[in-house]
Image (cartoon, coloured by chain):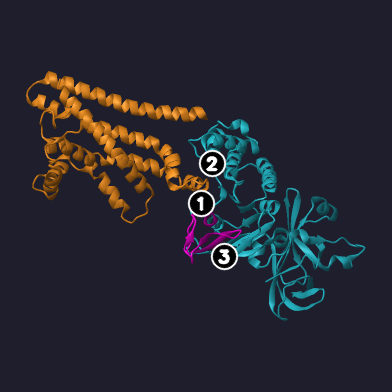
Amino acid sequence: MLTVSLEHDHPKLALDFQLPRGQVSAIVGPSGSGKTSVLRAVAGLLSTRSARISLEGDTWADTERGVFLPAYQRPLGFVGQRYALFPHLSAVANVAAALVHLPGAERQREAQAGLDAVGIGGLASRSPSALSGGQCQRVAMARALARKPRLLLLDEPFSALDRSTRKRLHVELKRLQAGLGMTVVLVTHDLDEAAQLSQTLCLLRRGRMLQYGPTPEVLRQPASVEAARLMDFSNLAKAEWVGTDREGATLRWGELVLRAATKVVSKPGATVSWTIRSSDVFLVKDGHPDESSLGILASARATEVISMGGSVLVTVSVDHSGGEPLRMRLRPGAVHRHGVHVGCRLRIALHPEAVIVLA
Amino acid sequence: MDWSALSLSLELAVWTLALLLPVGILIGRWLARTEVRGRPLLQAICALPLVLPPTVVGYYLLTFMGARSPLGTALDAWFGLSLVFSFPGLVFASLLVNLPFAVLPVQRAFEGVSQELHDAAACCGMNPWQVFARIELPLAWPGVLSAAVLTFGHTLGEFGVVLMVGGNIPGETRTLSIAIFDRIQAFDPGAAGRMAALLLLISLVTVALGYGALEGRARRGAGQG
C-alpha cells in the first residue's frame, strides 16, 4: 500500500490517501489541481512543508521524524509528460542510464532486454531525436522499469500521443502492469483514460482530494458537487429533502417528486444537490408497456438539440421542475424515431438508481 | 622572432586553462542552479573583468598583490614568492582576468540542461555526482569547450593587465603580445610583424579547432539521428 499525507503552501496541497498495492491508481484533476506536485512529492523531487510517504511499510518521507529519502534512493520509476529522454544518449543507453549499479556488460544486456520487452529492441542505437512520440514513450517506459521498481509513477505519459498510439500503449501498460504486478500511479486529466486504466480513482482539485475509491464506484457515485463537476456530470440541480424509507430517499424538485437510491441522509426541508448522468435520462415513448419500472416520469420541452458525432445532446426544460435544465444523451436513431427537435414535447424518465444525491 | 616570448605565452595560456577551467565549471554549474539571493551580484563580479579597462584591473592587482600589501607580505614571508613582476603573478592575474570567459559560457550551458532531465536522472537512481558526470557535463560540453577556447585564446592575446602586473622581463613576464609592443617601440616592424602574424595564426587555429570540435559533435549527434 502507498500511503501519502502531504501539506504544502506553494503549490497548495492538503491531502491524505492510501492506494492499494499491485494496482493501477489514477489521479485525475484539472490543470493546476496539484496532480503533478503530488507525484513529484512521492518521487522525492518536491520537498513539502509536511509529508508522510511510505510504500508497504518503508518510510520514504516523514517530516516529523526528519526522514527524507532523496529521489535516487527510492525504488521507483518515473515517466513524465515529455519523457525526458537524455538527448545525448541512444535509446539503449537511456535505458542503461537507469542501471548504473550494474557492471557494464550486464547493464547493456539488461537495457537491450528492456527495449525488447517494450517492442523496440531494433531501435536500440537510435538517438531520441530520431524516434517518434510513441517510440520515445516506450524508451521512457523501459527506462522507468529497468530497475524493477516497486512503484511506477506516470505523469500524463499519453497526452502528447495520437489517438491510435495512445490506445495501443494503454493496452501495453495494462499488460506490463499485470505481468510485473507493481503499484502504478497514473496522473491524467483525461477521465476516460483513468476509467479505462485504473482500479482506483482519485479526484483532485485545488490540492485537495475530493474523493477516492474503486474506480467504478467513484464513477457511479460522485460524493460532492465538485466531484460531479470534475466527472462531467452536466446535470446539477437543487431539491428539497423530504425523507427516507427502506428503498431510498424522496426529494422535491420544484413540484416534481423524485426518488433516489442513496446512502446520503439529510434533514427534511433541507436543500440538497443532486445529479444524473446525461446518458441516464431516458426518453419514454407513448404507450410504453411498463412505465412504472422506468422511475419518475415527467413531461418536458426540448430547448436545444446538438449532434455530437455518435450521439445527440438534447437539453430539456422539465415541466413543474425546480427550473434547472436537464441534458440527455440520445442515439441519433432515437432522435430520428421520436422526431426530437427544438420546441417539441417529450416524456422523460428519471430512474431512482440513476438519481445521485450529493453531499 | 622572440621564441622565449612565444613559449612563455603558451605556458601562461596552458596554466591559466588548466587552473581556471575546473574552477569555471564548478562556479558556472553552481551559478546555473543556485537560488541564493545574491546571484545577480555574484554574476556581476564574475563578469566584471569583461567591462573594466585592463589598466583598472592591473592597478588593483598591483595594489593588492604588491610587496607592501598584506597579501604580498604574507606570500613573501611564507613562500618567498612575489606576485608582482613574476610568472606566478602573471598566472594569478590571468586567472582573474579570464574568469568571465571560463564561467559565463559554462553557466549558460548548464542552464540549458532542463530540470526535467535532472529529475529523470534522479529517478533513474543516479546520485547528484552521477547526474553531474553522466548527464549534465556531457550536455554542457559545448559550453565548456567554448570556455576553454575563449580562455586559451584570450590569455594568448592579453596585453594590458600582463604589462601592468608583469612588466616586460625577458623569459619571465615578456609574453608574445608584450614582445610585439616592445619591437614596435624599438622601431623593428619586421620582427613585430612576424610575431603578430604568428599570434594571429595560433589564435585562428585555436578558435578554428574549437569550432571544428563543436561542429563535429553536432554532426555526430545528427548522425545518430
Have a look at marks 1 and 3 and say if they share a chain.
Answer: yes
Question: Pointers 3 and 2 in contact (CB under 8 A)?
Answer: no
Mark 1 and mark 2 lie on one chain; the one further toward the N terminus is: 1
| Image disc number at residue A99 | 2
Q: Residues within 10 Å of mark 2 (few under 14, many from 20)?
A: many
Split into 4 quadrants, where in the image is the N terminus of chain A?
bottom right
Pick the front one: B191 or A162: B191
Q: Amino acid at mark 2?
A: Leu
Q: Which chain corresponds to the colour orange? A: B
At which x and y percent is residue A140? 57, 42
Q: Choose top left, top right, bottom left or bottom right for residue A230.
A: bottom right
Q: Judge left or right: residue A295 versus residue A234.
A: right
Pick the front one: A300 or B197: B197
State the residue at coordinates (35%, 40%): B106
Residue located beneath label 3 in the image: A15
Separation of disc 3 and disc 2 at Cα? 33 Å
| Image disc number at residue A73 | 1
Q: Residues within 10 Å of mark 3 (few under 14, many from 20)?
A: some
Question: Pointers 1 and 3 in contact (CB under 8 A)?
Answer: no
Separation of disc 1 and disc 2 at Cα? 13 Å
Q: Colour of chain A?
A: cyan
| Image disc number at residue A214 | none
Q: Compared to A137, does A314 lie above or below?
A: below
Q: Compared to A83, does A282 lie above or below?
A: below
State the residue at coordinates (7%, 22%): B187
Q: Which residues are magenta?
A: A40-69
Have a look at marks 3 and 2 and say if they share a chain.
Answer: yes
Q: Judge left or right: residue A94 versus residue A168.
A: left
Q: Choose top left, top right, bottom left or bottom right for residue A218.
A: bottom right
At which x and y percent is residue B40? 31, 51
Split into 4 quadrants, where in the image is the C terminus of chain A?
bottom right
